[in-house]
Amino acid sequence: MGELILLGVSGSLIGITIFYLLSSLLVKQWVRLDIYQLFLFMAATFLTAIVGEVVLGKLYYLVMGKPLWQYHVWPIHDGYTSALNFITWPVYGFYQYCLHYVLTAKKRQLRAYWLVGLASGLDGPILEILANGFFLLFYQTFYFYYLPNDMRHYTSIQVVPLYMIGGMILTLILKQLRERPPSWLYPIVFYAAGVAFIVTG
């Protein structure tokens, strides 16, 4: 377990560093980290994503009669997610924060929810390929394994609509949270709820 957590932390730190440097390069200045907003993005993404992948994964199973993916590292909730995602999903929240910062700085905010969903449908599978590549390189196993072989099991074209749905839901949640007066209760409750979801898995 300790080795898995260490691997998850190291991979997450690499991802955070890459996202931050690329974002800073795009806006030609260091990205300003608003700690409250950053933690809000990370905590909301963690809870939305870890619950969403279980719900959407099971809906896919009900419709298609077989799972689309199975986690190979620390699987919980019938393999639809991983206990290690208490580390990895918040990194996707960090990515979302950087993306929002870059789009705001360039005055190209995606106000339509379907556009945000479309963006998630494109970047999600790319980030999945990178995540699986990292685990295959350092741990010799897939982090999550897609049953279809259309993308060599690293991800699948079939997951794009699910990312689009998840992206729209996450955008709506973040919009509501960011419009409220700042309160550390929000990120704390969201992250704690995500951890509770893992524990019950």
Image: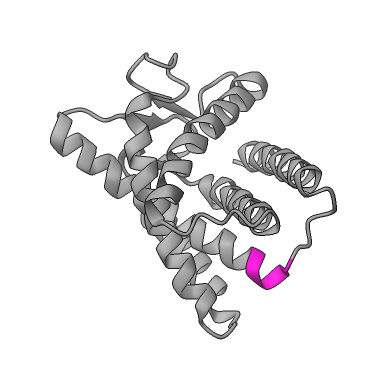
Q: Viewed as shown, does residue 128 lie left or right of 160?
A: right
Residue pictured at 45% horizontal, 50% vertical: 116
Say if residue 76 shows up in the picture: no
Residue under the image location 59 percent in, 20 percent down = 136
The residue lying toward the viewer, choosing from 141 and 179, is 179
Classify 189 as above or below 97: below
Magenta span contains residue 148:
no
Question: Does residue 92 appear left or right of residue 101 in this picture?
Answer: left
Q: Is residue 95 visible?
A: yes
**Residue 37 counted in the magenta span:** yes
Q: Position of residue 55 (x, y in %)?
A: 28, 49
Q: Which range is magenta?
A: 34-38
Kindly indicate the quadrant of the structure image that contains residue 11: top right
Residue 168 place in picture, x, y as percent:
39, 54
State the image coordinates of residue 36 (x, y, percent, origin top left): 67, 72
Residue 152 image offset from top left, x and y in percent? 44, 13
Who is closer to the viewer here, 34 or 144? Answer: 34
Q: Residue at x 62, y 50 (%)?
A: 99
